[in-house]
Image: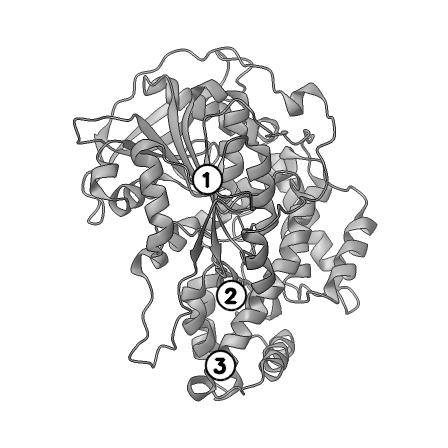
Amino acid sequence: MRQRAAVLCGAAVIAAGSVAAVPAEANGPRPAPAAPAADLHWKKCATDDYPTLQCASLDVPLDHARPRGRQITLALSRVPHTAGTYQGPLLVNPGGPGGSGRTLAGFVASSLPAKVAAQYDVVGFDPRGVGRSSPALDCVPGHFDPVRPDSLPDAPGVEQANLARAKSFAGACGDKYADVLPHIDTVGAARDVDAIRAALGAEKINYFGYSYGTYLGAVYAKLHPDRVRRLVLDSVVGPEDVWYDANLNQDLAFNDRHRAFLAWVAEHDAAYGLGTDPEQVEAAWYAMRTALAKKPAGGKVGASELEDTYLPGGYYNGYWPHLAEAFAAYAVDDDAGPLVEAYENFGALDASGDNGYSVYTAVQCRDAGWPRDWDEWRDDSWGLYGKAPFMVWNNTWYNAPCAFWPARSRQPVDVANRELPPALLFQATGDAATPYEGGVAAHRLLRGSGLVVEDGGGNHGITLSGNACLDEHLAAYLADGTVPRGDGGTADAVCPALPAPEPLQSKAASTSSRGSTLHGLLGFRG
């Protein structure tokens, strides 16, 4: 992190690659005909945590090029403004793709300073295909039920077993949703955002997106720069890596983050008894993986499920104490119970997870071209495995349906934008899901934007998660449009990262309740 910290306030980073020319559908999607006007009927849907939450539904065209054709339904939520000063709707999105955003509206409204939140209608929504929206995709219920084949294809038949699962999933999606899949993509979701804007009666929207939600926001801004008032992007998708390259970049970053977790376990040997040498702890973790590949814990946690369980630690270090407890119980005490519990808490998917994965694949496979030659996937994965063994093959199989996807892919959208009002970007230097370089690239492509960097931070989704410095920049921007301006370095403002968590046994142990709540809403993989 020291090397990156030095760059933040010095010369600009040279972003990798340049945007190549692509067909008009990609770089400049044609304006769609206006959808028929709609009235929203808001009803109370309060929860104990969010007592003022309201819900409504909105019909939008499946194909925005045919506004009077087949309609689908979006599920919306909002926390209405209460102040005399009204700054319009603030649409929020948790990422994914495939994440439900209805509860996020309540979280954002309750987490912003009250004076700021009161000036906005904070609006959440389930994007097309997601959650309470209809139709909600679920290509293969129980696709991730344990125990799956080992992700590492180093034994006869393992690669073919995983390939068969990927092909089967893609085929099932095509059989079940042949008429819907060509319209499940980011451009379609962005057009839905504009339909929500129109239904709200707003000339412009404010937008706040996390993770994949940053790409959705950037695509919307590309389509309708004149309809954006304020734009907040937290943990920014690399706009030049959509989507195959983005997953390869993730593999390296998640390996770094996993090793940071293992080093933290070594620092707290008194609590976990796994050794003081990070390499020793790492060896113990991979020994656990090898053992689980042969004999899954509780008949549920094999090697692939272990990776699923520890992946969330790459998103949020507030989970580290819980993951370390499970690791130590298995490796030191020969007790698999806590590991099974950790899997059920962090790795297992329920019906909403099945839905999220179905939309994730539908959007990513449709958004951009993917290699159709499996040899390319194999070569790239093995090429990275020696450097980053933690998640390479797990991530490969997660995305592998795109090699066989039944719907035609479009070209990625060039989100470079010189017509926007100043946007505000947030990025942690050690973010694994959306690596730091992506935030730098988006900052360069969005003219006039400001970049706030959490130096030394490794979490994904960093505002409204306990860092007061970051939240002050967010609140100032939403209050009056203030964007920090640097002195020529890559970052316009730098905030120190929060301290690492403490073991659960420690009296000093504490995690941000807001951070845990937020990361429960953001989910994983996006």
Q: Residue at x 29, y 35 (%)?
A: 479
Please give left or right for residue 123 compared with residue 337 in the image: left
Q: CA distance from mark 2 to mark 3?
A: 21 Å
Find disc 1 in the rendering and name its residue.
485
Q: Residue at x 41, y 73 (%)?
A: 321
On screen, 54 above or below 293? above
Please give left or right for residue 277 compared with residue 43 in the image: right
Where disc 3 sits, the SS reads helix
The amino acid type found where label 2 is placed reads Thr
Q: Reading the chain from its start, which is encountered first: label 1 or label 2?
A: 2
Number of other residues with Cα within 10 Å of mark 3, as a class: few under 14, some 14 to 19, many 20 or more: some
Please give left or right for residue 523 compared with residue 482 in the image: right
On screen, 222 above or below 150? above
Q: Reading the chain from its start, which is encountered first: label 1 or label 3?
A: 3
Find disc 3 in the rendering and name its residue.
267
Q: Quadrant of residue 144?
A: bottom right
Q: Nearer the viewer, mark 1 or mark 2?
A: 1
Q: Could you say where residue 128 lies in the image, as x and y percent from the top left?
A: 47, 31
